[in-house]
Image (spheres, rainbow, N blue to C red):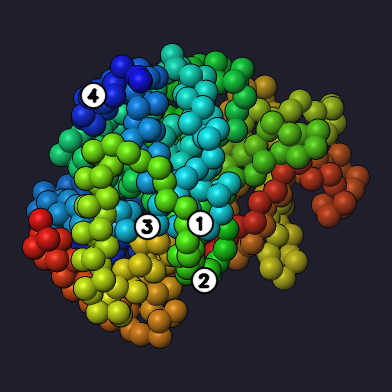
Amino acid sequence: MTVHVADELELYALGALTDDEAGRVADHLAACAACRTAAASLMDIVSALPETVAPREPSAGLRERILRSARATAGAPRAARPFPLRLYRSRFVTAGLAAAVIVLAAVSLDGRARLRDAEADTREIVERVSTSARTWYMSGTGAFEGSGGTLIAPQRGPAFVLFHDLKPIEPGTRYTLWLVSPEGRWLRTVSFRPDGGTFQTVDLATNVAGYDRCLLVLDSGAATPAEAPVVMQSRIAPPSS
Amino acid sequence: MSDHAEDDDPTLMLALAAQDLAALGTLYDRHGRLAYALAYRILGESEAAEDVVHDAFLSAWRGAASYRPERGNPRGWLMSIVHHRAVDVLRRKTAFRPAPLEAAGDRPAEEDTAAAAERNVESAGVRKALETLPPAQRRTIELAYFGGYTHTELAELMGVPLGTVKGRVRIGLQKLRRAMESAR
């Protein structure tokens, strides 16, 4: 039996739902013409709200900055999937695309050329995110700047990380991903070596509930996890509702 | 003057989809100030607001081929992208945040075209329509749209049940629609 979302459309149009709730509504709208019509009507009203703000002038350089960025991407392959407009966003597409967009934003111009070959890998990642997911981005620091990873926690199933541009490491060392709870409890999830690809997916074999930080450290087997050099880390924000 | 100065917005979107950089420049010239004003209203910081506008126009540039007129006019579509990104930034920055107040005495943007004059009239109409709402409904809508609060956060912030929040936005948006329609 179809459960309509008419009761939530005003909140959806204003952006006052959580990501999970908005994703559920978007999934329904993609399949229900009646709710989609109602939502479009509400969006018409909401789209007038920006007209009520006080006018402000951006800096003179913003225009050129935008054109320069667009010029840099002109000729690069466009997203294989349609742009995820809010009205039709599905959690499935959004979570995977969020991961891909976050990664794409962080990759250098040289790296973007390599992304053409990695596009198939990205599609596979999107396929894995089959239900709503939360994501957190980790950015490499110091000697590991330029690398990064998106921790992806599907609503069902274990979390995994999509890394990009992992640096080569010395023989005998490995990357180890740790989760840390608010009480200071450390959970070692997985150790691995970079496989040399632009993207590398690593499964955590656990979910992240109960932990508020994830860290990737350089593990030589000698130091305790708290002493190992931190490659990248992120706070894991709890769900908003 | 760019080649696209005389094109309407839907025509501009077609040019954008064909990767016409001049069309992107025209789109920015036409809607960039409003996009920035909206982002600033939500974030309260000029640098963060410019980053959001930059990212939103880049998203429009990359996604222009998927734009469909039935999803709304290009201006509304673009502002929807700006709003979405600005709220995402706002929610990531803080777990709970005070509603940003409107800055007093903002410098008005310079616009001297007939289209701008027409938009100013339209803007005044929407502002007036919003002012006709009862304070509780108006405040709830403003906190939701400009403050980036979820409905559960609104209920906590305003000290009312979730059902009251839903009712306020529903009735408020209905009244806003009627006020805007009667002003046309």
Residue under label 3, please give it. A53
Question: Where is residue A142 drawn, in percent x and y?
Answer: 80, 37
Which structural element holds mark 3?
Answer: loop
Residue drawn at point x = 53 percent, y = 69 percent: B97
Mark 1 is surrounded, within 10 Å at the Cα level, by few (under 14), some (14 to 19) or many (20 or more) other residues, namely: many
- Earlier in the chain: of badge 4 and badge 1, it is 4
Give left or right: position of B34 versus B181.
right
Front residue (pair B103, A14): B103
Q: Position of residue B122 (x, y in %)?
A: 21, 52
Q: Quadrant location of the C terminus of chain A? A: bottom left
Q: Residues within 10 Å of mark 2 (few under 14, many from 20)?
A: few
Tell me the SS state at disc 1. helix
Give a yes or no on whether discs 2 and 1 share a subunit.
yes
Residue B101 appears at what percent x and percent y? Answer: 47, 68
What amino acid does circle 2 point to?
A: Pro
Subunit bearing disc 4: B
**Can marks 2 and 3 be said to lie on one chain?**
no
Which of marks 4 and 2 precedes in the sequence?
4
Q: Which mark is residue B43?
A: 1
The N terminus of chain A sits in image quarter: bottom left
Identify the residue at horizontal 23%, vertical 31% (top origin).
B9
Residue corresponding to mark 2: B98
Looking at the image, tell me whether mark 2 or mark 1 is earlier in sequence order.
1
Front residue of this view, candidates B121 and A84: B121
